[in-house]
Amino acid sequence: MSALFLNPAHRAWLILMIATGVTWWLGEVGAAGTTAIVALLAIAFAKGRLVILDFMELRGAPLMWRLLLEGWLVVVSSLILLAYWISLK
């Protein structure tokens, strides 16, 4: 069974499933407030990065492609966080 998780894609899949379970649990228990929102956005960012690096196979890609896609993820996550911050005012 442990040989199954030697493949980076399998490890990424397991982490994605656990992260999805955590976000589902946070929704079920009714987590609210700034801390919960920031935690959910951080989990979403980590999941997006795993997808980019492992499932889109950019971990070994040229630096330009990694910077382009990871930069896009940072920009989108920052804009969502900024929109949430503005909505609090």
Image (cartoon, rainbow, N blue to C red):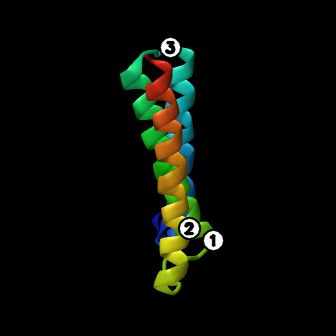
Of helix, strand and loop, which one carries label 1? loop
Residue that badge 2 annotates: 69
Quick one: which residue is furthest to the right in this view?
56
Which quarter of the figure has residue 57?
Answer: bottom right
Is residue 9 visible in the rendered image? The answer is: no
Query: Which residue is more in the foreground, 16 or 46?
Result: 46
Could you give the CA–CA distance between mark 2 and mark 3, rounded to whole angstroms? Answer: 33 Å
Q: Residues within 10 Å of mark 3 (few under 14, many from 20)?
A: few
Q: Which amino acid does label 2 sit on?
A: Leu
Marks 2 and 1 in Cβ contact (< 8 Å):
yes
> Residue at position x 43%, y 27% from top?
85
The residue singled out by tag 3 in the image is 29
Q: Which amino acid does label 1 sit on?
A: Met
Element class at badge 3:
loop
Image vertical order of residue 10 relative to residue 82, above or below: below
Q: Which residue lies furthest to the top in this view?
A: 30
Query: How many circles with numbers are drawn on the protein?
Result: 3
Secondary element type, mark 2: helix
Identity of the residue drawn at 48% across and 48% down: 45
Q: Of discs 2 and 3, which sits in the foreground?
A: 2
